[in-house]
Structures are given as structure tokens and as C-alpha cells.
Amino acid sequence: MFLDTSAALIVLIPVMLPIVQATGIDLVHFGVIAVLTLAIGLATPPVGLNLFVAADIAKVDVLSATRTLIPFIVALLLVVVAISLVPQLVLWLPGLFG
């Protein structure tokens, strides 16, 4: 939430990748969780670029847009928890091809 998505990918993924590999977490699973959590960060203040763009397009203030967005952020957080606890929700489709 405090880093831009591109900067977070460049800084955090190389640091976390050896830890992820050492713990035996599937790289596809890690990638999906990383991208989804960074997407949530794009829609939440204080750095949420998508939030500011959407508020400007809708001609509303950021606080009003944030209040409207709260149910969607909660739903996305529940999805992150679900795919973190049940990796097969993510890995079944790549398993069909590999």
C-alpha cells in the first residue's frame, strides 16, 4: 500500500523469491498472491493511483470513492485469504497444462 506497484515488484520480488523457494511455496501461487495484493494496494490510499484516477473521472472526492470501494476491498481480501489457505484454487488450471 505504501509503494507503487512497479517499484514494489522490482524491489520485493527478488528479495522474497529465495525465501519462497526455500519454503517450498509454488512460484505460480506466490505470483498470483503478489499480484493480487499489489492490485489491492493500487485501489487503497495513500498511494492508490487507481483510486485517485477513478475519483477524478467520476468527479467525486477521494474519501467518497474510498467509502464506495470498501466492500470490494473486503471481497478482494477474502479472496487473498482463500487462495492463501487453499493453493489449489490457483494451481488447478496450470496443473491442467503441465
Image (spheres, rainbow, N blue to C red):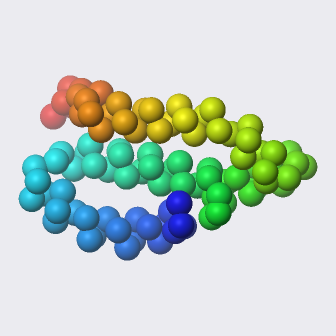
Is 36 placed above or below 74 here?
A: below
Quick one: 59 or 96, which is closer to the camera? 59
Residue 26 position, x and y percent, is: 18, 45
Quick one: 48 or 70, which is closer to the camera? 70
**Looking at the rendering, in which quadrant would you find the C terminus?**
top left
Is 91 placed above or below 59 here?
A: above
Determine the residue positioned at 43% across, 33% down: 79
Q: Is 90 situated left or right of 9 in this image?
A: left
Residue 11 position, x and y percent, is: 37, 73
Determine the residue positioned at 16% across, 47% down: 25
Q: Is 2 situated left or right of 43 in this image?
A: left
Determine the residue positioned at 52% across, 50% down: 39
Determine the residue positioned at 10% across, 49% down: 24
Is 41 placed above or below 28 here?
A: below
The reply to whether residue 44 is visible in this rendering is yes
Q: Residue furthest right?
A: 59
The reply to whether residue 90 is visible in this rendering is no
Image mark count: 0
Is 98 placed above or below 23 here?
A: above
Residue 61 position, x and y percent, is: 85, 52
